[in-house]
Image: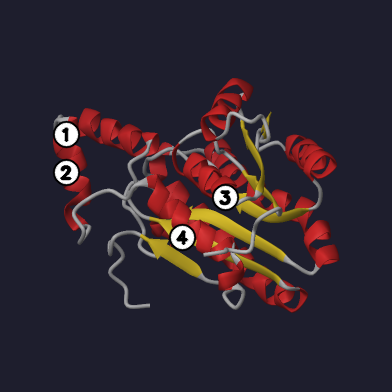
Amino acid sequence: MDMGIKGKTAIVTAASKGIGFAIANRLYSEGAKLAICSRSGENISAAARKISDKGDILALPCDVTDYSSIKDFVSRVRSELGPISILVNNAGGPPAGYFEDFDDEAWLRAFELNFLSAVRAIREVLPDMKANHWGRIVNMTSVSVKQPIDNLILSNSIRLALIGMAKTLSNQLAPLGITINNIATGLTKTQRIENLAMRKSTETGIPIDDVLKNMVSDVPMKRFARPVEIADAVLFLVSEIASYITGITLQVDGGYVKFVL
């Protein structure tokens, strides 16, 4: 099936591993002109080589918490690959913990990582999308925006701001042929899950394998998602097939979220 993104310039941030890498790989396989970034130039170059040995992927270091870094990255993409049509905002999550664990600086770091990074990237690519009357923006977030997770107070709080911004902006951009949606990922087998499980194991003394089993006990499918399953949902939302879908937060969670709507 032709997804309608062949030849379109796509940006995926934080794409050196995990979900970001899977998304980048999927968009490239559908013919998008791909630009990817992460904080480590070495890691993102290695990721590009894993996706393609043709040297046709623009892979650059970029710190998404630094606005000047985002500006430089988008400018380079535009210069080398042309106007940006697709933006996938991805970033690591803030640290786990409870209210008493975090001072103002921790809250501000989480705000920059999981909210301002998306705001700034969107601001930089919108002129291209508006000029072409076509654009797709997908923000990667967490099921915590629909069902808060007990020890992730930073994530539960900051990510909701992103949802509010995206919904408001989707209404403003819809007449211009630009959609903006969010993917709320469930428990996915990535390094972050391993880190969270290790923290839980250390705190409780429960073996890490048992912690991982306990994590998925509340998932009706009784397993973690594979990153490619998240990537397929992103591919759908950035495609022509999803041209009438905007302003939604789609959970890809194996049934984890218990709410009806």
Residue type at numbered disc 2: Lys
Query: Could you say where residue 115 lies in the image, as x and y percent from the top left?
Result: 60, 51
Q: Residue at x 32, y 73 (%)?
A: 259
- Disc on res. 213: 2
Other residues around mark 3 within 10 Å, as few (<14) / some (14–19) / many (≥20): many
Q: Position of residue 135 (x, y in %)?
A: 71, 63
**Circle 2 Cα neighbour tier, 10 Å, few/some/many (<14 / 14–19 / ≥20):** some
Circle nearer the viewer, 1 or 3:
3
Q: Is residue 107 above or below residue 87?
A: above
Label of residue 233 in the image? 4
Residue toward you, 240 or 61: 240
Q: Which mark is residue 209?
A: 1
**Residue shown at the point (46%, 60%) measured from the top left:** 233
**1 and 2 marks in contact (CB < 8 Å):** yes
The earlier-in-sequence mark between 4 and 1 is 1
- Residue mark closest to the camera, 4 vs 2: 4
Q: Which residue is mark 3?
A: 27
